[in-house]
Image: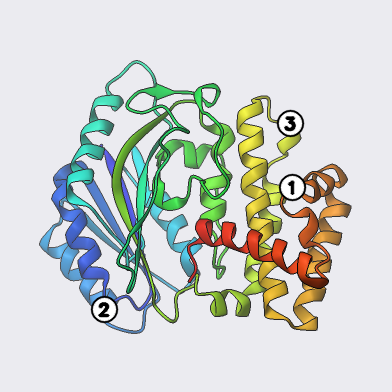
Amino acid sequence: MKLLSIAIPCYNSQDYMEHCIETLLPGGEDVEIIIVDDGSKDRTAEIADSYAKKYPNIVKAIHQENGGHGEAVNTGIRNATGLYFKVVDSDDWVNQEAYTKILATLRELSGGSETLDMLISNFVYEKEGAKHKKVMKYTGMLPENKMFHWEDAKHFRKGRYILMHSVIYRTQLLRECGLELPKHTFYVDNIFVYVPLPYVKNMYYLNVDFYRYFIGREDQSVNEKVMIKRIDQQIKVNKIMVEAVDLWKLPNRKLRKYMFNYLEIITVVSTIMCIRSGTDENLEKKRELWKYMKEYDIRLFHHLRRGIMGTTMNLPGKGGRKISVAAYKISQKVVGFN
């Protein structure tokens, strides 16, 4: 069995996927790199096949009809033979020194008496044109270099969340929790991280800057204009998260609080994007989202309204706009949009 399966969802990725793959190959035969060609119309399939041919013991190339990022991740999970599972997007890459430490840590923990469910590491926002690289760290919030449980986690500051870039899950856990990402939908990485959390018992935080998250392409899904254009998909993901987990039934208080906060920030993003678009149509979508939540779970509705969301519901005047901007800045940290 492989130690780590890494899925690379690719759609028309010919211009940058090779850099991504090259940074993952040094993992050697401990690693399985699953390149999922999601119905690309450029040279993506050809590049994937050439790597699979050159590194038959490390690289798998899978070709499928276009199903979107979520379906490419689903395919990765279905085909993974590794003990652990990681998603690396085709325009991102990993740091070599951190990669070596990650693999050594997984190797050591996989032989222990306790089963590791989730390994967390830092990621770096590789924002085009930015001199200072922002790093998402979890120091002071999570114990370092030891196995721990939710009870051992400290308070997560606003804007600090465990995102797809920072997480490696146990593969079997992803299957056991029934994770199935929707097809043809952006922003499903939030579902990928959120839904398995109640199944996670044992965690480990390695304070290394492993994942490099590239930001700056005009067509990128986290570009603000693109997000406004795709607001329906953001709202769809928001609703799936609301329905996926009954947060009131979670026995662990710290996990429950963390998941409430995560759901809150996703709802902030949905609401703020509707507001910033400025169109009557999108303001109506904002109202519809909150109406849906009120009807689905009145307690959740009131809980979210009491958080940083509360005053972004109705935003007339300068005060309302200030609160909207403050919430927007926090969401920027999480989503990383420019």
Q: Front-most of 239 and 221?
A: 221
Label 1: element kind: loop
Label 2 SS: loop
Give the Cα separation between the discs numbered 2 and 3. Answer: 46 Å
How many badges with numbers are in the image?
Answer: 3
Q: Is residue 52 above or below residue 120?
A: below
**Hey, which quadrant is residue 256 in on the image?**
top right
Marks 1 and 2 sit apart, C-alpha to C-alpha, by 42 Å
Q: CA distance from mark 3 to mark 1?
A: 20 Å
Q: Outermost residue, top direction? A: 113
In the picture, the disc for residue 307 is 1
Res 180 seen here:
no
Residue holding disc 2: 15
Q: Amino acid at mark 1?
A: Gly
Q: Residues within 10 Å of mark 2 (few under 14, many from 20)?
A: few
Q: Residue 299 at what x, y percent from top left?
A: 85, 42
The residue indicated by pointer 3 is 249
Quarter residue 197 falls in: top right
Q: Amino acid at mark 2?
A: Asp
| Front position in the image: 10 or 321 | 321
Count residues near mark 1 (Cα–Cα under 10 Å), then give few for <14, some for 14-19, many for 20+.
some
Q: Is residue 31 left or right of residue 216?
A: left
Residue at 25 percent across and 63 percent down: it is 20
Q: Is residue 210 visible?
A: yes
- Residue 54, x across and y down, in percent: 11, 63
